Amino acid sequence: AKLGIVIPAAGQGKRMGAGYNKQFLTLMGEPMLAHTVRLFEQSSYVSEIVVVGAEADVPIIVELVHHHKFDKVKICKGGVQRQDSVRAGVQALSSAIQRIVVHDGARPLLTLEDFHRFLDETEKFKAAIMAIPVKDTIKQVHETGKVIATLTRERLRAVQTPQIFDRAILAEAHYQAVSAGYYGTDDASLLEWMGYPVQVIEGSQENIKVTTPEDLWLAERILAMREA
Ligand code: CTP
Ligand code: MG
């Protein structure tokens, strides 16, 4: 099946506090988003890439795509929540695309090796996600700060992207979720909400989401280490 990539990049980066979309902050001299998109441009398994941007950012993204000669990329306009942006991205993929990978624009450290391993290990699943074991003990806490429960760490995973889906299932889940007003923080949660099985594949500790200023520093260090 032909593979398409949806890159949600329409956020505001509030936790980064840069005053603009964090995906235009530079890492090793290039915008974060350029690092993210390049990986998929370079993969021979990828037919099409949709970058989903906020309306105000679209001109900058057009320029970025042009500058880097990313020729698999289409751009579409995002929505209020990440889920709205992904839904728009899925709709923008051409009809030949029957398998979709969703990957955050703010995860610029995924490697081609890990991406291809992910494709290989997820081939037989209709829905699969990358995740890593959590290092910290995780507790559920009441609004007041009182501990409700300590979750069993061995069973916990910190979820990343890429997440891969058969197009029909992903489109259906997004359609049902928006109709019901259900919102999740990732795409797999919409399938879980519908009762579909989702497979977990081991991710990488380096595949961080750049969310707060320390992450930017760490991302830069990881890239510098790879180049050395
Ligand atoms: N995203 C999106 N559309 C939205 C919100 C988020 O496409 N309406 C994208 C972001 O651009 C990012 C990814 O989803 O690549 C993961 O979201 P997150 O890390 O939360 O980024 P922001 O929403 O931009 O950051 P914050 O929550 O701190 O404002
Ligand atoms: Mg957000």
Image (spheres, grey):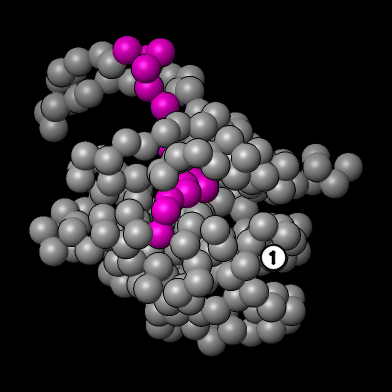
Q: In this view, does 46 lie to the left or right of 152?
A: right
Task: Find residue 102 and report its horizontal and vertical position in percent.
Answer: 47, 56
10 Å neighbourhood of mark 1: few (<14), some, or many (≥20)? some
Residue 154 seen in the figure: yes
Residue on which disc 1 sits: 41
Residue shown at 74%/79% (left/top)? 69
Comparing 120 with 190, the one in front is 120
Quadrant of the image occupied by residue 167:
bottom left
Report helix, strand or loop for mark 1. Answer: helix
Q: Residue furthest right?
A: 228
Please state if 72 lies on the left or on the right of 17 as rendered: right
Determine the residue positioned at 64% across, 74% down: 72
Q: Give yes or no for residue 153 being in the magenta stretch.
A: yes
Res. 203 image quadrant: top right
Is residue 106 among the parts visible in the rendering? Answer: no
Magenta part of the protein: which range?
Answer: 152-167
In the displayed structure, 153 sits above or below 213; it is: above
Q: Is the magenta stretch mostly helix, strand or loop?
A: strand
Residue at 64%, 84% (x, y): give it.
63
Give the position of the N terminus as an image quadrant: bottom right
Look at the picture and state if 109 lies above or below 147.
below
Against 27, is 227 above or below? above
The amino acid type found where label 1 is placed reads Glu
